């Protein structure tokens, strides 16, 4: 009888932890407060950077969704998109991608910095 109780408790705990993890992940994504169209451009730039010859440089970096200028994009116009990724320690990678008139995104270059591009610090 105690074995069954222990298995039930372990199962309930695992289920509860899964639910908490999913709720935490959802709240992080929702709290970013970045419109879907901007997210798509930023993610395309990130993917293009990761697939580029410089991709190994960014291997363990984290995308900083709020630090970008995708909101400046208007259909039918080109944009030099700037996104930022947090690297090791305080390294910030300022990544540039070109968005053409059709919305196609291509990786251009990156710079290492201590602060995100566009930061007032």
Image: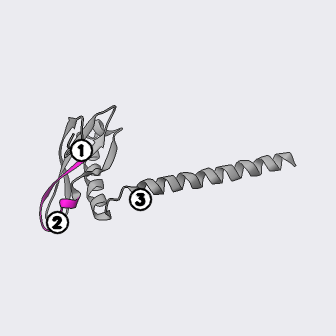
**Residue corresponding to mark 1:** 52
**Cα gap from disc 2 to disc 3, whole angstroms:** 24 Å
Q: Which of the two discs, 2 and 3, sits closer to the camera?
A: 3
Q: Which of the two discs, 1 and 2, sits closer to the camera?
A: 2
Q: Reply above or below: 52 against 42.
A: above
Residue at the top extreme of this rendering: 89
Task: Report helix, strand or loop for mark 3.
Answer: helix
Residue 44 picture quarter: bottom left
**Cα gap from disc 3 to disc 1, whole angstroms:** 29 Å
The crowding category of the residue bearing disc 3, from other C-alpha atoms within 10 Å (few below 14, some 14 to 19, many at least 20), is: few
**Residue corresponding to mark 3:** 30
Residue at the right extreme of this rendering: 1
* Residue at image location 40% in from the left, 56% down from the top: 31
**Horizontal side of residue 2 vs 78, given as left or right:** right
Task: Report helix, strand or loop for mark 1.
Answer: loop
**Horizontal side of residue 22 vs 63, given as left or right:** right
Please tell me whether residue 79 belongs to the stretch shown in magenta: yes
Q: Earlier in the sequence, mark 3 or mark 1?
A: 3
* Residue at image location 59% in from the left, 52% down from the top: 18
**Residue corresponding to mark 2:** 74
Position in image of residue 10 (x %, y %): 71, 47
Q: Nearer the viewer, residue 27 or 5?
A: 27
Position in image of residue 111 (x %, y %): 19, 38
Q: Reply above or below: 26 against 76.
A: above
Q: Which of the two discs, 3 and 1, sits closer to the camera?
A: 3
The crowding category of the residue bearing disc 2, from other C-alpha atoms within 10 Å (few below 14, some 14 to 19, many at least 20), is: few
Position in image of residue 116 (x %, y %): 24, 42
* Residue at image location 31% in from the left, 36% down from the top: 87
* Residue at image location 41% in from the left, 59% down from the top: 30
What span is colored magenta in the figure? 71-83
Residue 121 picture quarter: top left
Q: Reply above or below: 25 against 88.
A: below
């Amino acid at each position: 009888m105690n074995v069954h109780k222990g298995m039930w408790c372990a199962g309930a705990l695992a289920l509860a932890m899964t639910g908490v993890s999913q709720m935490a992940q959802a709240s992080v994504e929702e709290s970013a407060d970045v419109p879907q169209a901007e997210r798509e451009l930023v993610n395309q730039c990130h993917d293009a950077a990761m697939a580029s010859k410089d991709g190994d440089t960014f291997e363990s970096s984290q995308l900083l969704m709020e630090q970008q200028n995708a909101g400046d994009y208007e259909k039918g116009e080109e944009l030099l998109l700037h996104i930022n990724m947090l690297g090791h320690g305080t390294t910030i990678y300022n990544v540039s991608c070109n968005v053409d008139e059709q919305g196609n995104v291509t990786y251009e270059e990156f710079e290492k910095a201590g602060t995100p591009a566009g930061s007032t610090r």
